[in-house]
Image (cartoon, coloured by chain):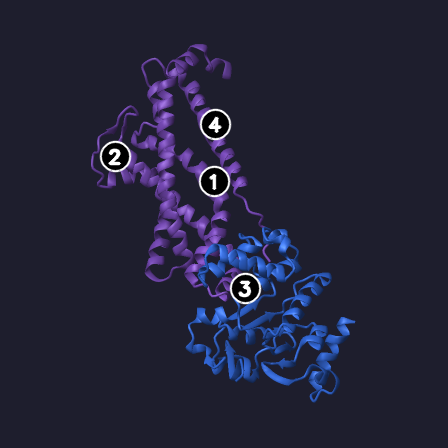
Chain colours: A blue, B purple
């Protein structure tokens, strides 16, 4: 059974179709990268999974459970999300950012929560920054805290919404390294990113989205080398040029 | 003009009555404290209702705020003193303050301050980036948990400069209780220079209480600045 299934998902904002008949499925351990021009509906697609945005048609199924049958906070506990702008809680330390969910949502006692938070900060290479406040961290460090915060909830699926787009170029690598490690460890990941290097090396599936529709979907090397759709070739070509 | 007005004899009169003015200062400080407390208790929930509430409750809070902010404080105090059915509660010993006047002044100054504090607090809540709420909800916190653990702690810190401002304003505006004869600092000053033959000391007395008001506002502001620094948390640009 698939871990995540989109079945004919529709989303409309003010009479404009943002997602049109989007269907695809991901298995446990899959790493899927979504690309597409701005306004294609990529972020909306991610936000529908944890119901930050509600869909207007079709359904989304997480490990056999239609997400609308789940308690929304239960759903969010099972799905981790990493934001473009990090969205770290600015009044809490790196550790405090992580323990909040552990203590309030998972109801772990304080010591267990701190232990788990520190372990996840260590996992993203920040064991020396546990007591730092977000304002004291670089962008790359902030995003790694953001990833650790989501991971600590032990989600079944991780969503990444352009996790490196707000970073200075020299800080992108440290975040992609963490993501590649996660992918290698078997985490199921649905990621919107324009990092084609990451898509080529870490993704199992690459999806091109345009005007709310899937243009093409397949293995990254196939889309890069023998795309079926002209739009795919054009779009991926442009992204790859940008990186060089 | 000053050398003519400022006379040694008048200064001696001020000095001889220092205890009288100290009692007035005590009343001023007490009235400031009680009014700010009322202001905080009213303003904090009112600000939260204006930020998050809807329907009639929010409408009522909005209207009360507009009325309180739109009425001169002297008018409010007189209105509360003569208009509210406050029982005659006797007076506070030593300070010689009628409790009913004290209650009316506290309510007027406090509720008006609450109307301003609610704006400070509402603005602080609304200044918190939407991403904070989204991130909190995304780890599975309920809306209430997110408000309590993520939004409010940040909003309260951002409100501190505004609250500090209110502190100074309320402290100075306690002098308006003069209008209902409450024995705070200004009223007591008037008591002194209205004594027969003491009108020449008016300028010295007013000057003396000006200094007292200034010392009070200056020291409390410095203390609050210091406390603000002690409890400050590194807060960078929103990202």
Among all residues in the image, which is located at the extreme top?
Answer: B9
Question: Mark 4 packing: few (<14 Cα in 10 Å), some, or many (20+)?
Answer: few
Real-space CA distance between mark 2 and mark 3, rounded to the nearest whole angstrom: 58 Å
SS for callout 1: helix
Image coordinates of residue A15 in percent, x first then y, are 50, 79
Q: Measure the C-alpha gap from mark 1 to mark 2.
A: 28 Å
Q: CA distance from mark 4 to mark 3?
A: 52 Å
The kind of secondary structure element at disc 3 is loop
Q: Residues within 10 Å of mark 2 (few under 14, many from 20)?
A: some
Q: Earlier in the sequence, mark 4 or mark 2?
A: 2
Instruction: Please determine if labels 4 and 3 lie on a single subunit.
Output: no
Q: Residues within 10 Å of mark 1 (few under 14, many from 20)?
A: some
> Which residue is disc 2 drawn over?
B100
Residue A74 appears in the picture as rendered: yes
Q: Which mark is residue B164?
A: 1
First in sequence: mark 1 vs mark 2? 2
Q: Nearer the viewer, residue A115 or B154?
A: A115
**Chain letter of the residue carrying label 1:** B
Taking depth in this image into account, of B71 and A142 the one nearest to the observer is: A142
Work out whether B55 lies above or below A231. above
Label 4 with label 3: CB-CB less than 8 Å: no
Q: CA distance from mark 4 to mark 2?
A: 28 Å
Q: CA distance from mark 3 to mark 1?
A: 39 Å
Residue under label 4, please give it.
Answer: B215
User: Disc 4, disc 2: CB below 8 Å?
Assistant: no
- In this view, the residue in front, B210 or B30, is B30
Q: Nearer the viewer, mark 4 or mark 3?
A: 3
Residues at circles 4 and 1 in contact by the CB criterion of under 8 Å? no
Q: Where, quadrant-wise, is the C terminus of chain A in this rendering?
A: bottom right
Label 3 sits on residue: A152
User: Which chain's residue wears label 4?
Assistant: B
């Amino acid at each position: 059974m698939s871990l995540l299934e989109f079945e004919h998902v529709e989303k409309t904002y003010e009479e404009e179709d943002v997602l049109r008949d989007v269907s695809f499925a991901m298995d446990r351990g899959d790493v899927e990268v979504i690309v597409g021009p701005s306004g294609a509906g990529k972020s909306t697609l991610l936000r529908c999974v944890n119901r930050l945005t509600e869909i207007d048609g079709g359904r989304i199924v997480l490990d056999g459970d239609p997400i609308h049958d789940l308690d929304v906070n239960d759903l969010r506990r099972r799905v981790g999300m990493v934001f473009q702008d990090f969205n770290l809680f600015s009044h809490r330390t790196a550790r405090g950012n992580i323990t909040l969910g552990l203590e309030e949502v998972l109801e772990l006692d304080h010591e267990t929560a701190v232990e788990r938070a520190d372990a996840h900060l260590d996992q993203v290479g920040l064991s020396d920054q546990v007591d730092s406040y977000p304002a004291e961290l670089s962008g790359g460090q902030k995003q790694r805290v953001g990833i650790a915060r989501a991971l600590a909830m032990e989600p079944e699926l991780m969503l990444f919404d352009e996790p490196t787009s707000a970073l200075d170029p020299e800080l992108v690598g440290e975040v992609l390294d963490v993501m590649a490690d996660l992918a290698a460890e078997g985490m199921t990941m649905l990621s919107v990113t324009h990092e084609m290097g990451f898509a080529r090396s870490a993704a199992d599936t690459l999806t091109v989205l345009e005007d709310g529709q899937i243009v093409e979907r397949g293995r990254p090397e196939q889309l890069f080398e023998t795309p079926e759709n002209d739009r795919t070739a054009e779009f991926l070509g442009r992204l790859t040029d940008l990186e060089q | 003009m000053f050398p003519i007005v400022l006379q040694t004899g008048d200064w001696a009169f001020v000095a001889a009555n220092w205890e009288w003015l100290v009692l007035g200062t005590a009343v001023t400080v007490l009235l400031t404290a009680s009014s700010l407390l009322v202001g905080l208790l009213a303003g904090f929930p009112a600000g939260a209702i204006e930020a998050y509430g809807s329907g009639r409750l929010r409408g009522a809070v909005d209207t009360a705020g507009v009325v309180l902010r739109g009425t001169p404080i002297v008018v409010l105090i007189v209105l509360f003193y003569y208009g509210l059915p406050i029982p005659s509660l006797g007076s506070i010993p030593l300070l010689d303050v009628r409790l009913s006047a004290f209650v009316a002044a506290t309510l007027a100054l406090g509720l008006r301050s609450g109307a301003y504090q609610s704006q400070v607090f509402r603005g602080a809540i609304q200044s918190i980036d939407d991403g904070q709420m989204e991130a909190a909800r995304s780890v599975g916190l309920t809306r209430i948990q997110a408000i309590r653990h993520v939004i409010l702690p940040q909003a309260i810190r951002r409100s501190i400069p505004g609250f500090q401002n209110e502190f100074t304003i309320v402290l100075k505006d306690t002098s308006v209780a003069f209008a209902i004869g409450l024995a705070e600092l200004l009223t007591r000053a008037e008591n002194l220079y209205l004594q027969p033959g003491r009108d020449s000391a008016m300028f010295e007395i007013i000057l003396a209480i000006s200094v007292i008001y200034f010392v009070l506002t200056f020291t409390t502001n410095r203390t609050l600045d210091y406390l603000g620094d002690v409890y400050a948390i590194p807060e960078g640009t929103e990202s």
